Image: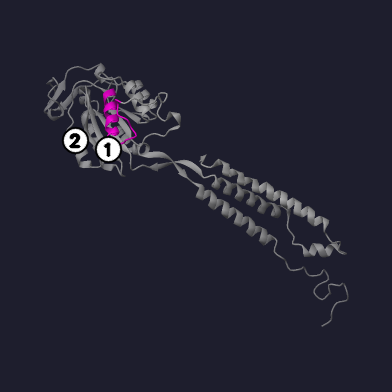
Amino acid sequence: MSLTWPWALTILLAFPLLLAYRWWSRRRRRKVAVTLSSVALVRAALPGRSSWRRRVPLGLLAAGILFAGTAAARPQASVLVPDDAATILLAIDVSGSMCSTDVDPNRLTAAQTAAKEFIAEHEGGAKIGLVAFSGTAGLLVPPTTEKDKLAKAIDGLRTSRGTAIGLAILASIDAIAEINPDVPPTGVEVPDNGGTAGAGGGDYEPDTIVILTDGRNTDGVDPITAAEQAAARRLRVFTIGFGTDQPSPMVCSSNQISGNQSFRGGPGGGGFGFGGRGRFQDMDEPTLTKVAEMTGAKYFKADNAKALGDVLHDLPSQVTLQHRKTEISVWFALGGALLVLAAVALAQWWSRPRPAAAPAGGPERASTGGPPIRR
């Protein structure tokens, strides 16, 4: 919690001043006290209050002044709130290894299904953009709320050679820069934040990049270098590693293969099997983890279709919820007013006059101690 006007806390000096005034007034009353002939009459005239009944209103008053002083300083709290201005850039790997069958029926089909479900279930005003990358990276759909357009583009994904994770991050940055004037494009130099997003006392931008890949970078810019660019712009990059670490046959349908890939005949069912297993199916989890950590995000591992669906389903709670400073002085003012009212009410209630107690000799005996009255 932070304070907009910290100097307003000087109002808290009112409480010790009130205590000093109370002590002075009690001291003054003692000096002008009148000596009475009967102490019993004084005790009967004064309302009986125990020590804790005297302290409770004082404590409530002190708490009320504390709350009021804090309210005057205009406190602000960092709270999680939905951000309808957020943008999510979903970058999907379409390298040849996405035809691996370690995820049924293959990684690309499972990724397409999970991505479409993520878009269909997404609620709120946040926009979603789509980037596809293999040896190069390109923006397929600029950030939009048109779910049908996004789903159609996902259905049209085709595999190609290479994996350019770094280029996917840079393409996503440029797509965000087109709609967010606070995010400079990749060709513009920005101040160094020490390599970590959010450093230097600033908040993250509401826009987020999500990288879904099954391998390691083989082309273009190094992912760490691209992550530094995202971090400097206070953009979070969530990374998802998809697939197992066991190389499997790569089989894609004819409409999942672009024209620039060579393939050889594979198993039946109209699919095509790719030659070559090995390093192109090895996932670089250390790099994906470091990219996420550098940008204040997280890395997720999904080794099957259900795990990928779960990751994408839970992602909006971390992506579209932003920490925003909200003024909460009204709550402190309300609390202070209630505490002061409670202190005054209790003091008045416990100080109210009480009816005099009946004499020890019963109702028939006069208060002067004389003989009982006959009726």
Q: How many marks?
A: 2
Q: Which residue is mark 1?
A: 128
Quarter-of-image position of residue 214: top left
Provide residue 46's location: percent of width, then percent of height: 77, 62
The front one of 92 and 100 is 92
User: Which amino acid does the dot numbered 1 rest on?
Assistant: Ile
- Using the numbered discs, state the Cα–Cα distance from disc 2 to disc 1 in whole angstroms: 12 Å
Point 29% across, 33% down: residue: 176
Decide whether residue 181 is among the magenta residues.
yes
Q: Which residues are magenta?
A: 166-187
Quarter-of-image position of residue 38: bottom right
Q: SS class of the residue under badge 2?
A: helix
Provide residue 368's location: percent of width, then percent of height: 86, 72
**Residues at discs 2 and 1 in contact (Cβ within 8 Å):** no
The front one of 220 and 271 is 220
Decide if residue 301 is in sight here.
no
Q: Is residue 329 shown above or below 323?
A: below
Quarter-of-image position of residue 253: top left
The front one of 182 and 245 is 182
User: Which amino acid does the dot numbered 2 rest on?
Assistant: Ala
Point 19% across, 21% down: residue: 161
Provide residue 20's location: percent of width, then percent of height: 72, 49
Q: Is residue 39 shown above or below 229?
A: below
Q: How many C-alpha atoms fall within 10 Å of the one at disc 1: few (<14), some, or many (≥20)? A: many
* Type of colouring: one colour
Decide whether residue 303 is among the magenta residues.
no
Q: Which residue is mark 2?
A: 153
What label does residue 262 carry, if any? none
Q: Relative to 208, is 57 on the left or the right?
A: right
Q: SS class of the residue under badge 1?
A: strand
Q: How many C-alpha atoms fall within 10 Å of the one at disc 2: few (<14), some, or many (≥20)? A: some
